[in-house]
Amino acid sequence: MYRFKPELRIPGPVPVPDAVSLRMAQPMINHRGKVFKERFPHVLSRLQPLFGTKNPIYMITGSGTSGMEAAVSNLVSPQTPVLCLVGGFFGKRWADLCQAYQGNVHVLEFSWDGGIDPNRVSDYLAQHPEIEVIFVVHNESSTAVLNDIEAISKARGNHDALLVVDAVSSLGGAPVEMDAWNLDVVISASQKCLMTPPGTAFISVSSRAREYMEKCTSSRYYFDIRKYEQFVEKGETPFTPNINNVFALEEALNMIEAEGLDNVFARHRLMRDMMRAGAQAVGLELLVADKDASPTVTGVKYPNADNFRTRIREQYGVEFAGGQGPHAGRIFRVGHMGYATPLDVLVALAVLEIDAGKFGEATRAAEQVMNQ
Ligand SMILES: Cc1ncc(COP(=O)(O)O)c(C=O)c1O
């Protein structure tokens, strides 16, 4: 129903603004030509404030997982002792990737309904001085948790381990301060808060991580960061890039810069608070506590969640995401990231309250948050 105007409220990919789509319709250009060489480095440098870094940023044509694999394949050699902090589906992906590269994988498990406890991280590291690299997810999209990466980074104390962060569903929606928080590798992707289509990953590497990469013995080719480094100096990528996504990103960055990064973050926090207040107002329980709540996605407990999702998709054209792992069928997730406004949250809540026969209750609660 209403497939001509789907209401995509999942945690990525997100709706793409018309201005961004139009920019993608530009004529194709030569990725080794003058125009690309002039524009590409500028686009990458405009991402630096979003990463909170002066470190170089590389673009990989691939989904977010390609950025994750680039990090692992350049850092994890067979038997490298690594620590994966797992509190959800994407934390587990770090562990799976490290296994695939035959690391000596230590996994610290956290419950899938809350944040990573930095104290447990520091205790573990104190007992395991051999750990060389830590992998963590900033915004765990599967549980709708925003982890405190600054605290996790500080939990290392004097431990030497590098810290690698998946910021796929936070970068551009919540502050990421790579330099101030002392992070070594940060990865992200195009289809979330960056408001562009899927197909592009970004990776930034600290000088300490770059040095460490030299001793990595894992086989790698497409994801070899040294290739990206060599080519970026010429304003190019080693392989044919997703050129249209570069055009798209230029326009998306125009929008982000015009709004101002702090305002972008404030909009995401407001949407979080509205969504949470609205869901609770119709008697639904949220998956995570306020202190851990993500500004880009909200998880709501719901019996037979998948039936509910099918119902609202068929009736209203509204698409919420399902639960993952232990939450499959038990929660739905509402994405409010990137090209999303408080009005979009009101629409999502309107569907929720209509379906529940509680007209006006969710939207009223959200509107109160908006006008506080
Ligand atoms: C936190 C997080 N990490 C990694 C990924 C993987 O990205 P992709 O599906 O683009 O490979 C996702 C995608 O939803 C994500 O939300």
Image (cartoon, rainbow, N blue to C red):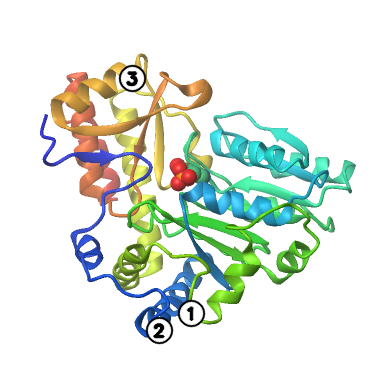
Q: Determine the residue positioned at 46% across, 29% down.
A: 287
Q: Is mark 1 within 8 Å of ligand 1?
A: no
Determine if residue 98 is in view: yes
- For label 2, the SS is helix
The structure residue drawn at horizontal position 50% and vertical position 72%, both measured from the top left corner, is 48
Label 1 sits on what residue type?
Gly
Residue that badge 3 annotates: 306
Numbered mark located on residue 38 in the image: 2
Q: Classify 10 Å Cα crowding around label 1: few (below 14), some (14-19), many (20 and above).
A: many
Q: Quadrant of the N terminus?
A: top left
270, above or below 288, in the image: below
Give the mark nearer the N terminus: 3 vs 1: 1
Identify the residue at the far top of this view. 304
Q: Separation of disc 2 and disc 3 at Cα?
A: 48 Å
Q: Is residue 103 above or below residue 216?
A: above
Disc 2 residue type (three-letter)? Glu
Q: What residue would you read off at disc 1?
A: 235
Where is residue 125? Give x, y as percent: 83, 45
Q: Earlier in the sequence, mark 2 or mark 3?
A: 2
